[in-house]
Image (cartoon, rainbow, N blue to C red):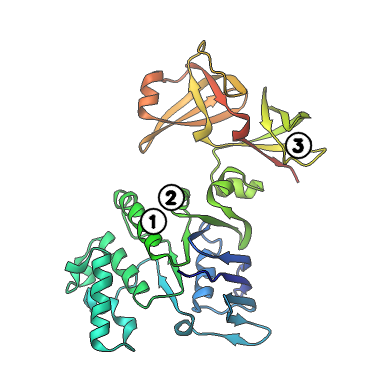
Amino acid sequence: MNDAILTANFQKQFPGGPRIVADNLRVGRGITVLFGASGSGKTTILHCLAGLERPQIGTIAFGQERWFDSAKRVFQPPRKRGVGFVPQDYALFPHLSVGRNVSYGLQELAAAERASRVTEILRWLGVEGLAHRLPAELSGGQQQRVALARAVACRPKLLLLDEPFAALDLPTRSRVRGELRQLLRQLDIPTLLVTHDRLEALALGDEVVVLHEGLNVQQGPVHEVFSRPVSLAVAEIAAVETIQPGRVLTTRDGLATVAVGAARLVVLAVDLPPETSEVYVCIRAEDVSLMRPGKFESSPRNRLAATVRAVAREGPLVRVNLDCGFPLTALLTEPAREELALCEGMELLVLIKASQVHLIPLS
């Protein structure tokens, strides 16, 4: 069990390019997701933590170990940091067998111990029968397991994964995602995982760090960050389906009444700063319930008459675009769509709990 915490505060400036800032980045036990759009600086931060790139200013420490300190001119090279790193393309040596790929970083061990450890980790990852194969003879999921085996064979203090599903096709991703989560749990090594995919972040992460234009704009538990973004930028990065401007009409007993388009919403607003009048209203599509008019539902405070504008399949789910006085998106399962017999132009009742509407004050 490793209870040491990675802490990082640094800046990396590329000549004529962006400035990447790791602002009070903390990685402890469990899986922390570094999340953001392409070009936001995720891979650069990962490379700096691994020692593959050197920031201009700042510090990187793991527990009591100082890996980088610009003021004290400290820079530990990758081999002295004890970090396991899995790049996007896995970077397996094409001319080496699986066994030799995994044993590559274990040259300091005696031959017998090296062979024993390789056998042990390949068996644990379920690829022991592939030890003599070359990487080109493996599937994408098998290559990922071998890359992970090589990264953890040296028993690292910290594991860094850069877009671990980028090299996999979509059907393989959904299957391997669950497997990787289980393996990382079993490893119990502090892990920082880079992704731009919200589903991957939700499925794998305990904590999430959101990057925007090279800056750390929010960090916290995954579901909290995605449900309660602190800014419009975070809401857009987190792909909140409905983001609409609103105006606070009244606040009382921790509830606010907000005008959104032609509609009124009651919102749980205990954290809304006093005197806030203009807000962005954020609603996740999975928090929107639909039913036929006339049915009684006692729980949600918000019941809005809506017209279906479009219905589209989206993988195993169905995306429904609605007009309920403002544009609103809902996500349903296929059985729910069939039960409602959804079609364009249909009149429905929208149900949204007050706690599932998030307000972002306009700055």
CB atoms at circles 1 and 2 under 8 Å apart? Answer: yes
Is residue 183 left or right of 202 when viewed as pictured?
A: left
**Disc 1: CA contacts within 10 A as few (<14), some (14-19) or many (>=20):** some
Q: Nearer the viewer, residue 140 or 262?
A: 140
**To which residue does mark 2 refer?**
203
Count of numbered marks: 3
Residue 116 percent coordinates (x, y) = 24, 79
Nearer to us: label 3 or label 1: 1
Query: Which residue is painted at 54% across and 56% down in the image?
Result: 208
Tell me, for residue 278, which label it has, or none.
Answer: 3
**Disc 2: CA contacts within 10 A as few (<14), some (14-19) or many (>=20):** few
Tell me, for residue 181, which label it has, or none.
Answer: 1
Q: Is residue 293 above or below residue 358?
A: above
Q: Mark 3: which amino acid?
A: Glu
Q: Earlier in the sequence, mark 3 or mark 1?
A: 1
Q: Mark 1: which amino acid?
A: Arg
Image quarter of residue 241: top right
Tell me, for residue 298, which label it has, or none.
Answer: none
Query: Which residue is painted at 36% across and 72% down in the image?
Result: 152
Residue 234 percent coordinates (x, y) = 61, 49
Distance Cα–Cα, label 3 vs label 2: 34 Å
Query: Which residue is painted at 21% across and 76% down in the image?
Result: 97
**Disc 3: CA contacts within 10 A as few (<14), some (14-19) or many (>=20):** some
Whether residue 94 can be seen here? no
